[in-house]
Image (tube, coloured by chain):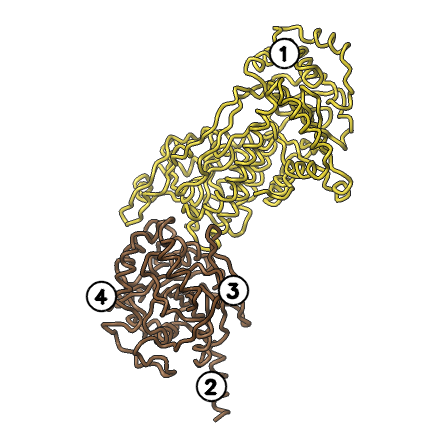
Amino acid sequence: MKASISRRATATARQSRRHIRPSTISIPSICITTRFQSQSTTTSNASSSTPPPPPPYPSSSPSVNASEISHFNALASTWWDPHGSSRVLHLMNPHRHTFIRACLSSQRDPAPSHKLRYLDVGCGGGIFAESAARLPSTESVTAIDPSAEILAVARRHAARDPALRGGKLEYLNATIESLPEAREEGSYDVVTLFEVIEHVDDPASFLERCGRFVRPGGWLVLSTIARTWTSWFTTNLVAEDILGMVPKGTHDWSKYINEDEMRAHFAKKVGWSSPRVLGVVYVPGMGWKEVAGSEKIGNYFFAVRKDPAEALVEREDMAVEQV
Amino acid sequence: MEALISRRTAQWVCNSCSRSVRRQSLLRYASTTTRAASEPDIYDVVCVGGGPAGLSLLTALRSNPVTSHLRIALVEAQDLAKNKSWTLPPDRFSNRCSSLTPSSADFLDKIGAWRHLDRSRVQPYQEMQVWDGVSDARIEFEWGPPAAASGSTTIAYMVENLNLTSGLLKRLDELSGVSVYDNARVERISHGRETEDGLDLTEWPVVHLSGGKQLYARLLVGADGANSPVRSFAGIEAKGWDYGRHGVVATLELEGSGWGGDQMKVAYQRFLPTGPVAMLPLPGNYSTLVWSTTPENAALLKKLGPKDFIAMVNAAFRLSTVDLEFLHKQGGGQADEVAWRFQHKHVDPATVPQTVVGVQEGSVASFPLKLRHADTYIGERVALVGDAAHTIHPLAGQGLNQGQGDVQSLAKTIGFSVDHGMDLGARMSLEAYNAERYAANHVLLGVCDKLHKLYSVGSGPLVPLRSLGLSAVNAFGPLKGFLMSQAAGSGVKVL
């Protein structure tokens, strides 16, 4: 069954090559100010609570944009160079697992006893996807990216590790819009969007679409960067222009979303609860440090849980009572 | 896969059994060469070298639930069954002993190996006496009342290296699950290949054993000593120099169990211009000698009969450097010369070790002293530990402890990688190990090297200066306490 899904997804992806997503990094250290901005940065109507009619398999996607794709294609070759431009992402990766574990252990109901199924959206070279697939607690990882070039790098790299064989890790050249929803909807324990949303044109509809793949009781986990003067200074000016740590053109500051905006977005949505946030700060020479409160000024993790099936029922009951 | 692992587990049940199992598995291997050629034998960790550093690493990995599922292989040239069953009568001691710091002992205890050592052969000591052979300036290390009250009065433990190796092997035996290739020669180490089904192992080290066995390593650990073949494979250079000195070792019998009896054992070290001479306590009336000296002096000491050798050792802790120089020039008759000189030289007996009355037959040996430090401890899918990474002057007795520190750090680094889904052999995953150990080892190597050079000077302005240094340190309590904590490995880490 799996094979047929992947064939189908690849086929649809082939029709829609012009997509993207990818990665981000900052080196924030001080807080300046937070500028508020309406969430929707594009023309789409997707921020309304009613989901847009899912286009069967769109030839263009609201979530990705062509210039982003070509930018990250150019970076493909250095993705696994430990001293290359993706080094900061490699260093951040262990914190992603720490954060996911914190989310799972925060549940009041028992954590799932089965092995976890991951969907990694915008997997890039596979830094997170590979690591998740190596964990003994993982059932499978489906990793998607719109850039065929970066996926080629990811596949070549995964072929170097015998532990990643046997179908546990599957790469698909797809966008979240082109993933066959009917088959996969609600089937992932953890859907991850690491350093992706800041590269997306229509974050609200993108989140909406990603959320559908989370099983009831599962988690939508993302990391991104706040839109502050600090983050502009550190990611665009310092990291890209001055230090050259991150390739120029990696960040579009106006697309950054703040943590309070993220929380407000999910507070309005029915069926999502238990938002969690964790700020991380990059200290040159020492790596990433978890710093409470730093989510207001720079990079942060954010997670929100899809209500378990029982809770949904309860909520529906409540709704009925209110009526 | 499961079946394969459990078969390998069985290999380590006991060594005599394991060898027959191994022979079987080799036979099986031979009979399925075609399959074996297409399916590489892949391990998470292949450790070359079954000395204290390599064995501690594997024990640490096997005893930690996070890393206990890893596929591990050990390659060793010696017969490990012999090392495991090592034993000596209580009145005989191996001449290769090490001073284990309490932090090394704690680590060995944590991984469950300490209780497998023959504890009746382990000797803790509570005091150190160090003095300058030219000026007689002296520093005495002993724990003050606060430390004594807390019960941690042990500066270090004297342990025979073979006692440690045997204990570690017994613990590994108990843990099981390591594929052991002992009596095995590493013919060469190469890189892997791309398999027909698209697995790319071109960056994976492959250890080729004599007999044709090939072990693929996610992480290849070089615990293979100062001339490490693993280090050569990784193209890592080790820089340093030879001291032009040899270390002479011997097992000595003293007139008693020490001035403080069995409860208060003392380690003695005297800095002579030719190098430091140290006497470290073993259980009962026994002690072990480590005498760093010129190759010529070492050759003479090894040639002397027991009576003359004993006289030279007693003289080394008591007579002037001029007298010692003279005695080293005599082809024999040192016993009479020394007896005569002692009549004219008064030494406070409490400041020197008790008189040596015997030397264990065949225990006098020597080895050249060098300082080597690898440029880095890590490469892609390679990590170096212990002597493969660094060789230190033995004057501080830190060599084996440095190796234990390496192993503790590497095991922790591997555990972190496994816990976070990282490829434990990737260079990036190993960076934490290199960062944690390299600078710390470098400082210790440097300090011991400078001490050696400082005390190699027999006369001139350095002598009163360094004596002033020792006396000042002795008089200044806090500094002495700090130095002592470092020696015991319990102090604040500078780095």
Identify residue type, mark 1: Glu
Q: Position of residue B168 (x, y in %)?
A: 57, 38
Relative height, residue A78 to residue B472 (above, below)? below
* Residue at mark 1: B325
What is the chain letter for disc 3?
A
Marks 3/4: CA distance?
37 Å
Please tell me the colour of chain B: yellow
Measuring 56% from the left and 40% from the top, which residue is drawn there?
Answer: B405
Q: Position of residue A176 (x, y in %)?
A: 32, 70
* Residue at mark 3: A102
Element type where label 1 sits in the image: helix
- Decide if residue A4 is on the left or right side of residue B151: left
What is the chain letter for disc 4?
A
Badge 2 and badge 3 in a common chain: yes
Can the viewer see residue B223 in this picture?
yes
Element type where label 3 sits in the image: helix
* Residue at mark 4: A14
Element type where label 2 sits in the image: helix
Tag nearer the camera, 4 or 1: 1
Crowd band around label 4 with a 10 angstrom C-alpha radius: few (<14), some (14–19), many (20+):
some
Badge 4 and badge 1 in a common chain: no
> Which chain wears brown?
A
Identify residue type, mark 3: Ala
Marks 3/1: CA distance?
69 Å
Tag nearer the camera, 1 or 2: 1
Q: Position of residue A140 (x, y in %)?
A: 39, 62
Identify residue type, mark 4: Arg
